[in-house]
Structures are given as C-alpha cells and as structure tokens.
Image: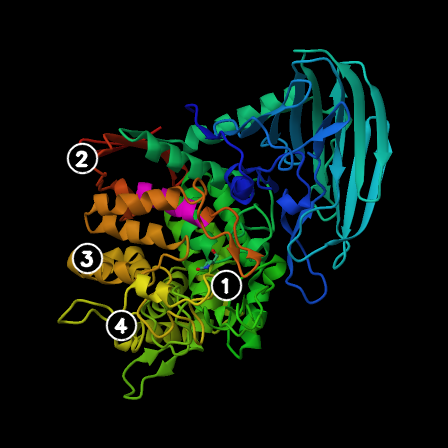
Amino acid sequence: MRAFTITADKFTAENIPHCGNKFLIGNGYFGIRGTMEEYTKEHMPAVNMAGIYDKVGDAWRESVNAPNPLSTYVKINGKKLALPDAEPISHKQELDIAKGIHTRCTTWQTEGGEVCVTCERFADMARRNAVGMRYTLKTDFDCTAEITTGIDGDVWDINGPHFVKIDTASRGDIEAVSGTTGEKGIIVTAQECVSYRFDGEINVRCGEKQVLKTITFTAKANTEYCFEKTALIYASCDEKPCTDAADELNYADLKREHIAAWERIWDVSEVEIDGDDEAMLALNYSIYHLNCIAPRGLSGISIPARGLSGQVYKGAVFWDTEMFMIDYYIHTEPAVAKTLLQYRIDTLCGAKTKAAEYGLDGAYYAWESQEGGFEACSDYNVVDVFTKRPMRTYFRDKQYHVSAAVVYGIMKYINATGDTGILSEGALEVIIECARMYRSLLIKKADGSQYEIRDVVGPDEYHERVSNNAYTNKMAQFVFKTAYDMIKALDNDSYDELNKRYDLEKLLDVFKDSYENMYIPQPSEDTGLIEQFDGYFKLEDVSVDEVRSRLLDPKEYWGGAYGVAADTQVLKQADVVAMLSMFKNDYNAEIMRKNWEYYEPRTEHGSSLSACMYSLLSCHIGNPDAAYPLFMKSASADMNPGGKEWAGGIYIGGTHPASEGGAWIVAVKGFAGIDIADGELVCNPNLPKKWKKLSFKLMFKGELYCISIENGKGTINKI
Ligand code: IFM
C-alpha cells in the first residue's frame, strides 16, 4: 500500500466536530473519534461501540460510547496545557490511512519556553478489543511536568447519560472503568496499563467516573518523556469475551500486528488511479473508512448510517448498508457482506413485528434498525425550529423501500459470490416475507388494470405520502420477481421442505401476478421523463436556490407537511435517478440522459447518498466527466468541512459511509464499468479524461481478480 496521509495543520475550535469524523480510527468493534486526548465530553470524544444500545427515559434510543481510555493532559509548572482552551503555536493532526494510525503534535508557548506533546494511537485491527497509544512530552526548558492519563467514564452522549452506574478501579498495573447501561444492564469496560521509563512520582486516583494516574517529574530541556498505553474495551454482552489483560500486552507488538492486519486489508482493497492523485487519495480514504467499520469476525450487527463515529441517527442501521456500502464488502471481503446480511436474517422477526403493527403481511424492515430489528424511529423525527415542537414525519411508517433494499443486497451478494447457500440459511425467507409485505400494499387501479402502491415516502424524503413513487414500485416489482425466481429455482427437497411452511404454489401465483401487473411509471412519449410520483410534474417548478431563499430559518426542515420543498419539484436526493442507475438494463441511454438532465438541477443533494447515484447514472450514459465532480463529492464527504453538522441544536454530523461506499461503486461499476453478464465478470470502462489508468482487485465467486483499465480497454485477470 502506498503512503496516504490525511493532515490538518492548524487548530480551529470550530473544526472540532469535523476533525472528530475526519480523523476517525476504528476496527469494526468500536470507532474512536479523531478528538484530542485532553478533550472532555463537550468536545465530543467517543469510543463508539458497535451494536450496543441504550434508552434513557423518553429520549431516543441510541448506541453507547465506552469509557474513554485515551484521556490525557499535561501541566507544566502547575499550568494545564490543553486544547481548545490553551491556544497552541502549532498543531498538526494526521491520519495514516495505510496503517490506521492517528497522530497529533501540538506545541504551546509558555513563559518558560515551548512545550510539545505528540501522541500516536490506533484501534487495533488485529485484536478487536485493543487500543494502543504512545504519548510524548518534550519541553525546551527545565520544568516540573505532570502527565495525567486515565480512563474517563463521563462520556459524551446525545440522549444519555447511558451509564446509570460507573465503577472505577486500580489494581496493580491495571486501571479500569466500567459503565452499566440503564436499559439492559450491559457493562462496558475500558481497562488500561500505562508503562514508561523515566523517574517520576506517581499518584493514582479512582474518582466517581474516572481513574486518573498522574506522573510528576522534573523534565529536562529537549528530552522526550514518553509513556505507552495498552488498553482494552469490552462489554458484558460480547459474544466472544475478551481474554486479554491490558498489562500482558506490549505496545510495540500490538502496533506491529495492527499494521500487518491493515496491510492484508489494503492488499485487496487499494485502488490505484494514474493521473489523478487527488481522486486516488479521496477514494482510498473512503475505503479506509469502510474498513474501519467492517464487522470482521463479529456477528449480530450491521453498519450504522454514521458508521462508528457516534450516536447520530441513533447509531441505527439504514437502507444505506445494502444499497451503498455492501458492494464494497461483497467484492473485497465477502464474509463481512454476509455478516451484514445475516443481521437482516436475524432481525426478520423485528421486521415482521413492524409489518404487523401497520396491518401488513410479511416483513417491513425498520427505517432505523437497532438490535433485533427494533425500529428506533419515532413518529416525530424532526423538530419544528419555530415552535420547538416535534413534527409528525413519515420516515418510519412509509419508507417501504427499505425492505426491497434488503432483498436487493441479498441478490447482489448471491450474484457476485455464487453463495446460494445463504438462501437456505434464512435469506429466502427474508425475500418471501418482503414480497408478502409488498403484496399487502398493492391496490388495484380504479380501471382494474394494474396494481399501484399508494401513500409512500420514496428516497426523496421531502415529499411524503405520495402515490406510485416510481422507485418504490419498481423495487417492489423486483422483489416479487426475485421471490418468484428463487422459489422456482429450488431443488425438489428444498421446495418440499419450504412447502411445509408456505403454500408455495399459491405464493408463486401471487408473486407472478404481482410483478406482471405492477404499475411502473413509464417514460413519457413526448419528453422521455418518468414522473417521480403521481402529480409530481404538477408541483411548482422552481430552482433549488429559490426554495432555499424561502427558508425563514436555515435549520428549517425542507420536507414534511409544510416544508419549503414539499409543494415544489425540488427533491432531497436521487429518486428516479437512483432507480435508473440500478436498473440500467431496463432503460435506454436516451431516457436515462433526459431524466438525469431533468432531475439533477431540481435535486438539493441534501443527503450524502445523492451524489453517487447521479454520478453512477452519468457513467452509465457515457458521460464520465459529468460523473467526476459528483464522484469527488461522494468520496470526499468526510474529508472537507462544511457538511451539515447541526440541525436545530442536534448534532447530525458524523462519518458518511454510504457516500464512501457509493464512491467505490462509481469507481468500480461506473468508471471501470464492472458488471456481471451471464454469470461472468465483464468490464466496459469509461474513465474520466484525466485518469490514465485505473487498477484494483475484486473478489468474484471466490476468486480474486486484478482489474486494470488503460487506453479505454479493461483487462480482468485471475490472480
Ligand atoms: O438513509 C438516509 C436517508 O435516505 C436520507 N437521510 C439520511 C439517512 C441516513 O443516511
């Protein structure tokens, strides 16, 4: 893997939330925000745990942050030096994405002279519970120095506090802080061992929420004083208990194993782009994030919409995973993709419960899914900025397309891995139950000709409760056809077995009737345009800027009953365009072009899921240069400040793994034109002008391939 480093060489307090996302490290079991070691909870440090949730009172249920074992600050001659309060004369934060190592180097000017701290740390990719940290203090004058390091159980929460009980302990060389969650009594522990080789007086304090160890010593000018910390994070609900002890780990060994693990990951996942270093960095940075949150060797969890960067969107799993992220894992680490799908199989019961709650058959997957498929979304998911009252929204009730995304994800996985075995492991039941759910939504059109689906919210969330959303109807048809085909493909034994639980003959009839008679909004003969939903073209046709100018408050919600976009054609994110980019073989290039050109100027791209879909469709219609800026936007979602971070006083920032996965899809399926035709991998490339060569590896049906595109020609070689 070539050296790729992300840097911020200036400190600004307003960038603290952004840097927390941008410099995230993680290993799938937890994510550690790119915050400074001295930060307290106001600055949003977090060791965000995968798949552990808690609810406090009536507040939203959300994922849990572990006690923070990185907590460290220094005092020089009795004066504390800590960001953001003490302004530095220089500050550099770096992320080595090849090695998964975060470093910071900060220098302060004091009365006595300069004080510099450096710290490197990593979320161990080889040992899921471990964290390594090496902290160094250097002054250019003799002074009395204090380094205080420990574990902080007073963690940042959005809807917390989640720990109803915090225990602190210090025994021998080990300190530990355990927080017990209120709802389920899960104990989340951080344990640490600190080692150093200089003389100092040591003082360990076990407080109510922290254990802090202070080393006081006389620092000589221009001498480095360094301590190493090995820490472990684990929870009482872990499937595989942590068997390590922090004092048995060695920092250098951990670091070596960690780097080797990243090397193995990059060996398959690195993408090389000749002629465009900026794009190569952005894309590999996206891949870095996808790797930090992959649940390797874990079970029962999937990836939340904001990855492991905190509690935004309740730490919940959305359709983002199956539509935007899973492709990357399918083609680099299929076992991870299978884990993601297993989560949907395991949570089928939750999806059935939700369907029943709405009077539907089958399985209706949660818009915001937590453990067990629990729907975390409330009926009031947005706050009115004027009245401060919760607003009734329909994300939870009406985004039926989530179930289809699960089926779509399953089929992408099967087509690319050949692992049809997953069907008998529960995936077929998921497909059938999703098809049953869609069937119970169908209504015969008044003229009796076809089935329609009324009262939905499509991917464009600004228009609620619409009918015949082209995307939703097309996805429902896809689910019916998939369910039909998968049942038809069963061998006799499997058919008989499944027939004990379902009347398969009847289901085949029902699914066939459903997909054959499903109403799919068609391109107009005059304009070639597909109407996003019934009546969309009758809405006010104004520009995105005009709609924006109507906001009375910048934090107003654009959608819902009376949002500024609701009665206009302005949409939040790709909707018809998402449908076209997914079903490109069903439409000709001219139709796709006309719809892209119509919908793009009317799209706010208010969701980070939007740009990649437009970019992908641009590639499909042979316009890679129009695709390029949208690809870069998608790949850089977490690199540049300026994304939506706050809404109505609620932090909505965090990392954007769907956007990052979307960027990978554009590079591989768009620019490189990788597709599966007749069960084989094919390549129809269309590179942006400045890309001289694009190369990457890809897993397909259990084999690793090397793909290389140069001079308009693609080669696919088995490794
Ligand atoms: O799933 C998305 C949704 O489509 C748009 N709002 C954000 C969600 C989470 O990324």
Is label 3 or label 4 in front?
3
* Residue carrying label 1: 429
In the image, is 500 to the left or to the right of 597? Answer: right
Residue 431 at what x, y percent from top left?
45, 63
Callout 3, which amino acid? Arg
- At label 1, the amino acid type is Glu
* Mark 3–mark 1 distance (CA, rounded to whole Å): 37 Å
Q: Which residue is mark 2?
A: 712
Span colored in magenta: 658-668
Colouring of the image: rainbow
Q: Hey, which quadrant is residue 232 in on the image?
A: top right
Q: Secondary structure at mark 1?
A: helix
* Residue name at image x 66 percent, y 16 percent: 139
Please state if 506 lies on the left or on the right of 546 as rendered.
right
Instruction: List the residue tagged with mark 3.
Output: 593
Per the image, the residue denoted by label 4 is 521
Count of marks, rendered view:
4
Residue 670 in which image quadrant: top left
> Of label 2 and label 1, which has the lower sequence position?
1
The earlier-in-sequence mark between 1 and 4 is 1
The reply to whether the C-beta atoms of the residues labelled 3 and 2 are less than 8 Å apart is no
